[in-house]
Image (tube, rainbow, N blue to C red):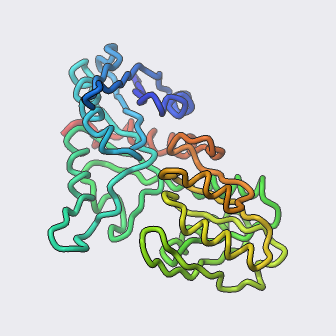
Amino acid sequence: MNRVLLPFPAQRALAEALAPRLGARVGRLDWRRFPDGESLVAVDEALETADVAIVASLHRPDEVALALRFAAETAREFGACSVGLIAPYLAYMRQDARFHPGEAVSAPIFAGFLEQNFDWLATVDPHLHRYAALSDLYRIPARRVVAAPAVAEWIHAHVPEPLLIGPDSESAQWVADIARRAGAPYQVLHKVRRGDREVEVSLPDAGAAQGRTPVLVDDIVSSGRTAIETLGHLRRLGLPPAVCIAIHAVFAGDAHAQLLAAGAARVVSTDTIPHPSNAITVAPLLAQACAELFGDESARPR
């Protein structure tokens, strides 16, 4: 067994956590950008007969996409038998339909882009909306890792008398799963979005929330507007400051600072995207999925 993880610089800590669980070594992947925006990528040359996985979180996909392709192709040039992609955060899942005339449906296009260079894919809680499963979108072996066990374990250990709150009706199923694992009740917000940065929310049963610590759980926190509005709503109900948990800490602009300024007791995220708020690791869950894919003959180059 010859397994090598090649992490982009920001994912090196995650790769080092994954490596012993996968019986892999962590190799070198350097990436820098010239002043004109072009990428220079260099990888470990000792890849002959190796099964390789590149570790890269795709929260800024337009910056990293070509570098990702360069790394995969160069790994093959140096003799890699297969090249997989461990993308803790998977981008371009939002635009899975044409909402306005002339728009590109980017989800399947981006999937095709990745399929050209990778033999398999593992990711954490992708934003599946109109696709029931990753296999509906990707033709290579793809595994969806669910962060719920890790999130529930953290809540159980760190939050007294929690009440989980999901951001909208789409979140009900996975918030219910986390709540069940944490042994806690949950509610889902009634939400009306009036624009990219204007949201109105309300808690269905404010009475049931009394005496509990609100825990706002969302898969992706970008602008943070829903959470900020919710924090204000909970404060007006007389509830204690809420804990905010993000699976993917996108935190566009100063969203993280705004959440704290809005009264969050704590803002916590998983390590799918490196951020100071990272407190929940997905490495054990990712390793389970990747171990299956590393040994899967169907994930060999086509």
Instruction: Quarter of the image for the N terminus: give it.
Output: top left
Q: Is residue 67 left or right of residue 187?
A: left
> What residue is at 25 percent from the left and 20 percent from the top?
79
Q: Judge whether residue 176 can be spotted in this image.
A: no
Tell me which corner region of the image, top left, top right, bottom left or bottom right, holds residue 148.
bottom right
174 or 218, which is in the foreground?
218
Measuring from the top left, give residue 220's x and y in whole percent: 50, 58
> What residue is at 61 percent from the left and 44 percent from the top?
278
Measuring from the top left, give residue 57's x and y in whole percent: 42, 42
25 or 38, which is in the foreground?
38
Can you say whether 91 is above or below 50 in the image? below
231 or 247, which is in the foreground?
231
Q: Residue furthest top?
A: 46
Tell me which corner region of the image, top left, top right, bottom left or bottom right, holds residue 70.
top left
8 or 286, which is in the foreground?
8
Number of numbered callouts drawn: 0
> What residue is at 31 percent from the left and 14 percent from the top?
45
Q: Judge whether residue 42 can be spotted in this image.
A: yes
